Amino acid sequence: MTPKRMDFFHMVSLQHISTTRLPTLWGPFQMSLYLEAATAKEHVLLWMGEWNRPDKIPLVRIHSECLTGDVFGSLRCDCGQQLQDAMNSIAKEGYGAILYLRQEGRGIGLAAKMQAYSLQDAGMDTVEANLALGFSADERSFVVAAEIIKASGVSKVRLLTNNPAKVEALAEAGIEVVERVAIAPVLQKENLKYIRTKMEKMRHLISLDVVSDSERLPGEEG
Ligand SMILES: [Zn+2]
């Protein structure tokens, strides 16, 4: 028997566990939980409105878990701000979705991320620190996100990202990124080196001009 084409392309096994209403500061979202069989990780689809109607092309954000940035408001990275921006943009449109993937620290885990922070305090940038710890610069995969988007019946998105790797990952999975919607970082003294490294070493498309007019880093001499 010839294997079905779908089986061949189905790269991860995901099980929908639960969906519930989640009122937030930005408006009423719905939260759906998916269990990834191979890793036992619980990934979240946070969505609003009729984001998967065929006549709509929703704003979508693929966001990797960052405990320090998302929860504690760490200024070492811009994750927390990006997540809040995405929720705000989706709420303004009234529909859209965030894939919240459980791959902390660009996939190296929380403990290694904290070790990497210590190396960064000793002078390394984020890529050099990951490499020194035996990881690649970015250990993440966006296959889970693509699978959840497809399982929701969505084939075209407007992706909220500065990272071309995410656009490429969705395209490879057969999802058309009709538009890439940039997220302007809020520059802080603590995250400037991190954001520059993302631009210079990780191909992130960030225009510092966009924010430079109002740029006056907290703590810097005027
Ligand atoms: Zn972060």
Image (cartoon, rainbow, N blue to C red):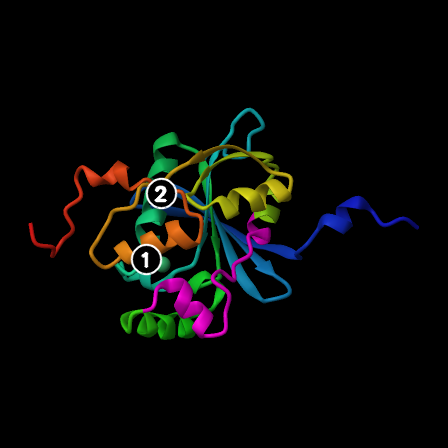
Tag 2: Cα neighbours inside 10 Å, few (<14), some, or many (≥20)?
many
Tag 1: Cα neighbours inside 10 Å, few (<14), some, or many (≥20)?
some
Residue 147 is situated, as x and y percent measured from the top left of the image, at 61, 48
Whether residue 37 appears in magenta in the rendering, the answer is: no
Q: Quadrant of residue 150?
A: top right
Residue appearing at x 32%, y 57% in the figure? 194
Asked whether disc 2 touches disc 1, contact meaning CB atoms under 8 Å apart, the reply is no
Tell me how far mark 2 sits from mark 1, CA to CA. Answer: 12 Å
Q: Is residue 48 visible from the viewing direction of this image?
A: no
Q: Earlier in the sequence, mark 2 or mark 1?
A: 1
Residue appearing at x 58%, y 28% in the figure? 54
Q: Tell me the amino acid under the disc marked 2.
A: Ile
Vertical placement of 119 versus 66: above or below?
A: below
Residue 56 is situated, as x and y percent measured from the top left of the image, at 52, 27
Q: Circle 2 sits on which residue?
A: 206
Vertical placement of 90 versus 79: above or below?
A: above
Q: In the rendered structure, which segment of residues is drawn in magenta?
A: 124-145
Relative horizontal placement of residue 81, taking residue 53 as reference (left or right): left
Relative horizontal placement of residue 138, taking residue 206 as reference (left or right): right
Secondary structure beneath dot 2 equals: loop
Whether residue 129 appears in magenta in the rendering, the answer is: yes
Residue at the extreme top of the image, as rendered:
55
Q: Tell me the amino acid under the disc marked 1.
A: Tyr
Residue 169 is situated, as x and y percent measured from the top left of the image, at 57, 46
Residue appearing at x 60%, y 38% in the figure? 175
Secondary structure beneath dot 1 equals: helix
Residue at the extreme right of the image, as rendered:
1
Residue 139 is situated, as x and y percent measured from the top left of the image, at 52, 62
Q: Circle 1 sits on which residue?
A: 194
Q: Nearer the viewer, residue 116 or 57?
A: 116
